[in-house]
Amino acid sequence: MADRTVPHAYPMSVNYEMCTPARIYDQNFAEALSPQDLMAPVLYHGYYIRPRINKQLERGFSQVDNEDDWYRVLLDVCQFTPDELSVRTVDNLLEVTGRHSQRVDEHGFVSREFTRTYILPMGVDPLLLQVSISHDGIMCIQAPRKIQDLEPKINELKIRVDKKGGKSC
Amino acid sequence: MPVYYVDRDSSLRAMAEEGVTISHGISCPARNKLHFEKKGPEKCTEIHNLFALPGPGLQELKLDTRSSTGFVGSGEDLGEPLFRILLDVTQFKPEDILIQVFEGWLLVRGQHDTRMDEHGFVSRSFTRQYQLPDHQMQAGDLTAMLCHDGILVVETKERWWAASD
């Protein structure tokens, strides 16, 4: 069997591995199903999966775009309304919290709560973060990212040569 | 697919005798490609753990085929439960889930503490309530099962059989 790479146990930054996926799914949780929603199991890449009728494939994601001059987080929060969400930063951590009290859906009553923490990379000022929610329930958190400041500042010092021998320090 | 196991082997052998090349309909998991390149897929046919198949899921198979007609179960007809709920708890471990029955209501709670994933740290909790059909129903009348694909099934032990058959 081929060797596998083991990720570092204690990641130092968000780029702890080059292969960190930009987009992960299955962020919507506690979804009730009815038996009609599940179709017969099929074999997919060696595992059984049960396809769902009403599963929206491109929903329930969390996406981190770490571009050159922008840092952007997209998070699907369609299970929550904007007043049930709060976003705050603690040092270089970005915390998104959602909590909704008991509400009725077609299966019964449900209440949910989640907290998701992102690690801001170098050069992102937490005070410049902007949060917006689109009409289809996708939260967008973005901030400009400074990259030129991360380069070392080089300052060449001029050496002055004293010609006169009178003054000595 | 597991239904065809017995017949498939004999038909594979027959096809191999005829000199027909068989390629699998399912693409091989990427982590096993190297293994198959070295040995060839025909020699690996007996190593089932390469595919990490979950355990026999006949009970689960039966759950999904309520509406389909063609499926034949393994043995006796177990009937339909009086009450059944399905809940997607992919993000939770079995020990994170608590199921309670209280005065005709079924409470399902799930909570997991902060854990690390690809984008940082996350913690979640939820509470779901369902009304049971019978107010006198106790927790002992229900069975719960967590399928390998993260779907929690809670149903009554009591069964009924449709009048048509």
Image: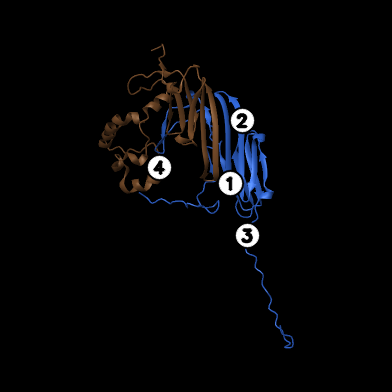
Chain colours: A blue, B brown
The residue wearing badge 1 is A118
Q: Nearer the viewer, mark 1 or mark 2?
A: 2
Amino acid type of the residue tagged 2 in the rendering = Ser
The residue wearing badge 2 is A101
How far apart are labels 4 and 1 at the CA level?
A: 31 Å
Labels 3 and 4 in the same subunit: no
The residue wearing badge 3 is A150
Mark 1 Cα-neighbour bin, 10 Å: few <14, some 14–19, many ≥20: some
How far apart are labels 3 and 2 at the CA level?
A: 44 Å
How far apart are labels 4 and 2 at the CA level?
A: 42 Å
Amino acid type of the residue tagged 4 in the rendering = Pro
Mark 3 Cα-neighbour bin, 10 Å: few <14, some 14–19, many ≥20: few
What residue do we see at 55% from left, 42% from top?
Answer: B122
Question: Tag 3 or tag 1, which sits nearer the N-term?
Answer: 1
Q: Is residue B139 left or right of residue A130?
A: left
Q: Are marks 1 and 2 in contact (CB under 8 Å)?
A: no
The residue wearing badge 4 is B29
What is the chain identity of the residue bearing mark 4?
B
Q: Residue furthest left?
A: B17
